[in-house]
Amino acid sequence: MSPSFALLVADDPACFADAAARKFIELLEASDRPLVTLPTGLTPQGFYRALVMNYADRRDCWEGLRFIALDEYCGLPANDDRLFSSWLKRAVLDPLCIRNRYLFDSAADPEQEIVRMQSLLEKVGPIDIAVLGLGANGHIAFNEPGTVFSSSIHVADLAPDTIKANARYWGREDLVPPKGMTLGLSDLSGARHTILLVTGSSKADVLKKALQGPVTTAVPASYLQKLTNVTVIADHAAAELL
Ligand code: F6R
């Protein structure tokens, strides 16, 4: 099967961050008031630093940008440092003065909050640019294995692998909030452009499954094979099996 994605393989972390920032800026330049979603985690850190260091003066890109949260833990107070929104504010939203923000309210009743966010996305969507990271279990945001491709914004039980991976931010696995709110795979499928960022040999197998294996809810990221405008930016370690 011919690949339905463009693949950029970066030689080192600096090239990876630079390639991601350039591609993102290229898409922003071609969009008017784009609705953008962005991931947290280790993978995009260099990308955010590259944006802040090299493109902070691109007011034309940041003023019109509308940011919608990709995912969030349930049940934390508004000012908690470990909220994904707090992390993104520190890494990218505040430094780039991105003011238009549609965030999950972690402290709200989750079921009511997803109804609010669903109706908000209906008004402000669709997403123009989705930048995504890949979980080692194939998740995208909190769309864990088994999530149906038709899912909209929903409350998710974090998979045991995700709790284990996120424990590094919480000190202990049992401290990781067990539930999150997330954009669904159908919301993400509607994105006009998708950039998937992947690094490290620990993601090589799951990246191959996502892009070249069966399209299956067992590997949520395999929904990407159904899209057309996907750019995968990886390092050599992650791309070695493609
Ligand atoms: C978090 C998110 C997740 C991460 C994924 C990879 O907002 O969307 O899908 O992108 O868990 O995380 P890292 O980059 O820490 O390996």
Image (tube, rainbow, N blue to C red):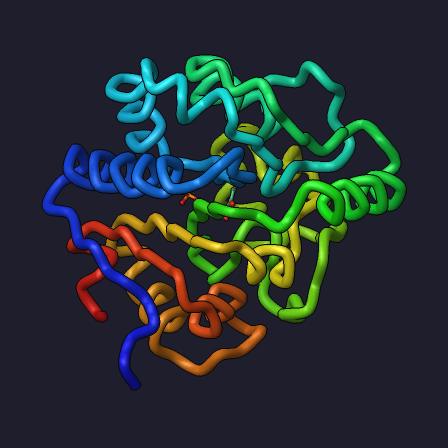
Q: x, y (%) of residue 57?
A: 32, 14
Nearer to us in this view, 119 or 79: 119
The structure residue drawn at horizontal position 27% and vertical position 51%, both measured from the top left corner, is: 233
* Image height of 166 relative to 154, above or below: above
- In the image, is 80 to the left or to the right of 135? right
* Image height of 11 relative to 7, above or below: above
Nearer to us in this view, 147 or 183: 183
Q: x, y (%) of residue 60?
A: 40, 22
Q: Residue furthest bottom?
A: 1
The structure residue drawn at horizontal position 57% and vertical position 31%, both measured from the top left corner, is: 66
- In the image, is 167 to the left or to the right of 132? right
Q: x, y (%) of residue 74?
A: 74, 36
The structure residue drawn at horizontal position 77% and vertical position 48%, both measured from the top left corner, is: 118
In which quadrant is the C terminus drawn? bottom left
Q: x, y (%) of residue 133?
A: 43, 48
- In the image, is 137 to the left or to the right of 148? left
Nearer to us in this view, 50 or 124: 124
The structure residue drawn at horizontal position 76% and vertical position 50%, both measured from the top left corner, is: 155
Total labels: the figure holds 0
In which quadrant is the N terminus drawn? bottom left
